[in-house]
Image (cartoon, helix red, strand yellow):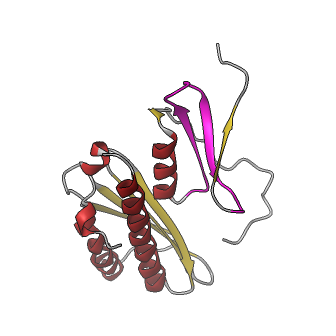
Amino acid sequence: MKYQIVGKNIEVTESIRVAIEKKLSRMDKYFVIDESVLCRAVVVSYKVGAKVEITIFTKEMDLRTEVRNDDLYAAVDLAVDKLEDQMRRLKTRMSRKTSRESLGRSIVFENIQEEELEDEMDEVVRTKSIYLEPMSLDDAITRMDALGHSFFLYLDEEDEEISVVYVRRDGGYGVIQAENKLK
């Protein structure tokens, strides 16, 4: 796995880089390692504490987690633990389904065991455009869980409608689809 470690408001020293790479190397056993697997860690320093954002990019899907803690090294440990938990949930979800060969090309399932808000709330701080791949609802839920998000936008392969799947507060998932057709 290739590592990219970026610091914001902090200089990533050699000792920080080595510690982060050592912790992240625990994740190597979960992936079929080739040139396409990239792990990006973003370390952000605050007046009190630090935040670590880790994203693992594979050909089939991305896994992401974000942890804030008073101690940088504790934040890295917690982030890696969260990623391993995501992998366990992914394995459970995949074992309940029929064969998912596309994910199997990147992930080695056998190795997996069973912020403070600013006052700028009404300002758009990020715009993202994405290409929507046709996929089933189960695949959309799997990708949403792998990213650690509470919602996921996708193109439903059955009816070719743009859909949003989300995690309901009372448990389970919900799906939102627009009634009007796009031209």
Please give the name of the residue rendered at 52% of the width and 68% of the height, measured from the top-left corner: 66
Residue 114 in the image: above or below residue 69: above
Q: Which residues are magenta?
A: 149-170
Residue 131 in the image: above or below residue 60: above
Residue 105 lies in the magenta-colored region:
no
How many marks do you count on the picture? Answer: 0
Please tell me in which quadrant of the rendered image residue 29 appears.
Answer: bottom left
Q: Whole-percent x and y of residue 146?
A: 45, 57
Look at the image and tell me in which quarter the C terminus lies. Answer: top right
Q: Whole-percent x and y of residue 91?
A: 36, 61
User: Which one is nearer the viewer's eye here, 140 or 115?
Assistant: 140
Residue 181 in the image: above or below residue 32: above
Residue 167 lies in the magenta-colored region:
yes
Look at the image and tell me in which quarter the N terminus lies. Answer: bottom left
Q: Whole-percent x and y of residue 94?
A: 37, 54
Q: Is residue 62 visible?
A: yes
- Considering every residue shown, the one lying at the far top of the view is 183
Relative side of 9 to 98, left or right:
right
User: Which one is nearer the viewer's eye here, 113 or 65?
Assistant: 113
Please give the name of the residue rendered at 26% of the width and 50% of the height, measured from the top-left corner: 104
Q: Is residue 55 visible?
A: no
Relative side of 65 to 16, left or right:
right
Please give the name of the residue rendered at 68% of the width and 50% of the height, measured from the top-left corner: 125
User: Which one is nearer the viewer's eye here, 127 or 144?
Assistant: 144
Q: Whole-percent x and y of residue 107?
A: 28, 56
